[in-house]
Structures are given as structure tokens and as C-alpha cells.
Image (cartoon, rainbow, N blue to C red):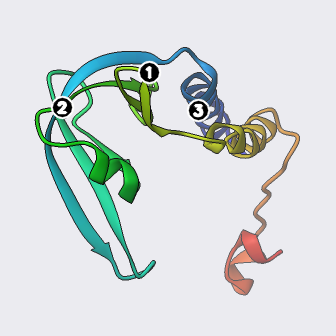
Amino acid sequence: MDVITRLAMFIVAVLLALDAFGSERNENLRVDRHSRSHSQWQRADDYHLHFVGGRVDSCDVGWSAWNTLQDGDEVSVDTSRVFKSCDGIRRGDQVISQAHLHKGFLLIPIALLLAAAFGWIEFNRGVDDDRRGGWWFS
């Protein structure tokens, strides 16, 4: 694997680690509107809250949080610093939505990316691999 690919994997792993385990940013926002979309793959509705007054435009939430908050409500939104993902929504002392274990699951792709970046996992592609359809079938 060439140096540029390894460097890219290392940078992505560092960004994921900073996003997952870095400090959260807390913003006070106002709920601007609600939206709902239907996912044909999951056969369920996806609920979104849209905000004004900060750097986060919207958050994906569950049905309960979507119904609890009204347009114009002032809320406190916890977000990650790198990718701006919503980690929690509170109104006063009431927790409306909270991320549970999704950050712990990021350890798997972070570990795989770091292992590939340091050469502990090899992705070798030989001349014969083109005949079989690619290196992932070897």
C-alpha cells in the first residue's frame, strides 16, 4: 500500500477518534421546524428537528423527541466538534434525546484504519488478481 493511502487512513482514524472521544460542544438553539421522511429500506419514518441560532442545522431524533418538542422551544444541543453529530438534546433539566453507545462502536473502524495505516493489515494486489475480479476475493 502506498504512503498516501496509509496517510489518508491515519488522518481519517485520527478525525474519527477526535470526534468520538473529544469534548462535546454545547449550543443553545431554538427549534425552527419539524420534518419527517419515509425510508423505504427500513419501512419506517425518520424524524428530524431543524434548529436556528447555531452551527447545527438539524438532528435526527426518535418519535418521542420529535413529539415532545414544539417549534420555538429553546433547547441545549450537545454536538461533536469534528463532524457536528448530535449527541444529546435537553430542554432545561429535561433530557429529550441522548446518544447511547454509538461512540463505542467507532473503536472498530478506528482500529482497522490505524492497523492498515501502520501496515499491520496488508492489502496486496498482484497481477493475477485482475483475473479474479479484484483483491477483495483473494
Identify which residue, 63 or 60, lies in the foreground: 63
In primary-sequence order, the first of circles 2 and 3 is 3
Q: Residues within 10 Å of mark 3 (few under 14, many from 20)?
A: many
Counting from the top left corner in percent of width and height, residue 102 is at 62, 44
Q: Nearer the viewer, mark 2 or mark 3?
A: 2
Residue type beneath disc 1: Arg
Question: What residue is shown at x 74% (from left), y 71% (from top)?
Answer: 136
Query: What element does badge 2 sit on?
Result: loop
Query: What element does badge 3 sit on?
Result: helix
Identify which residue, 75 or 6, lies in the foreground: 75
Residue type beneath disc 2: Asp
Q: Nearer the viewer, mark 1 or mark 2?
A: 2
Question: What residue is shown at x 78% (from left), y 77% (from top)?
Answer: 137
Identify which residue, 108 or 66, lies in the foreground: 66
Left or right side of 96 for 68? left
Q: Quadrant of the C terminus?
A: bottom right
Label 2: which residue? 73
Label 3: which residue? 16
Residue type beneath disc 3: Leu
Label 1: which residue? 81
CA distance separating discs 2 and 3:
31 Å
Q: Residues within 10 Å of mark 1 (few under 14, many from 20)?
A: some
CA distance separating discs 1 and 3:
11 Å
Counting from the top left corner in percent of width and height, residue 18 is at 58, 22
Question: What residue is shown at x 58% (from left), y 32% (from top)?
Answer: 16
Q: How many discs mark residues in the rendered view?
A: 3
Query: What element does badge 1 sit on?
Result: loop
In primary-sequence order, the first of circles 1 and 2 is 2
In primary-sequence order, the first of circles 1 and 3 is 3
Left or right side of 69 for 13? right
Left or right side of 91 for 73? left
